[in-house]
Image: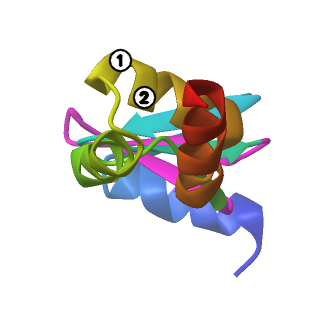
Amino acid sequence: MNPRMMKQAMKKLGMEQEEIEASEVIIKTAGKELVFSNPEVSKVTVMGQETWQIVGTPQERGFSKEDVRTVMEQAQVSEEKAAEALADTQDIAEAIMKLKAKSL
């Protein structure tokens, strides 16, 4: 089905689709973020209800509370210092080694 026919069929069903120019989409979850860079984003409206579609490959950013707790325990530092080290290194083992090296 060509795009024009698809639009006509959608209109008959009360559907509208709008392409959104987005450079980045971030979905925040408990302790982590999913970051879509240069995604294809569409807003689909069906009978007044909006649905958003994101097409792309996400990159995980952030760490869970368990990750922070592990760094805290292994490096014997505060939660704040553990979280900062994880943000800087983006790696649990590297964060632990960095913090242990500072305490020497």
Viewer can see residue 76: yes
Looking at the image, what colour scheme do you see?
A: rainbow
**Residue contact between numbered discs 2 and 1, judged by CB atoms under 8 Å:** yes
Q: Which residues are magenta?
A: 38-57
The foreground one among 7 and 54 is: 54
Q: Which residue is mark 1?
A: 80
Near mark 1 (Cα within 10 A), the count class, few <14, some 14-19 or many ≥20, is: few
- Asked if 102 appears above or below 65 in the picture, the reply is above
Viewer can see residue 41: no
x and y, in percent, of residue 23 in the image: 77, 29
The foreground one among 48 and 1 is: 48
Q: For residue 99, what is the image quadrant? A: top right
x and y, in percent, of residue 39 in the image: 71, 46
| Residue kind at label 2, given as amino acid type | Ala
Q: Say what secondary structure mark 2 lies in.
A: helix
- Asked if 53 appears above or below 85 in the picture, the reply is below
Quarter holding the N terminus is bottom right
Q: Say what secondary structure mark 1 lies in.
A: helix
**In the picture provided, is 67 more to the left or to the right than 26?**
left
Furthest residue toward top: 80
| Residue kind at label 1, given as amino acid type | Glu
Furthest residue toward front: 104
Residue 83 is marked as 2
Main SS, magenta region, reads strand
x and y, in percent, of residue 55 in the image: 62, 59
x and y, in percent, of residue 86 in the image: 54, 37
Q: Which residue is at 27% across, 47% downward?
A: 73
Q: Which residue is at 66% across, 37% downward?
A: 101
Quarter holding the C terminus is top right
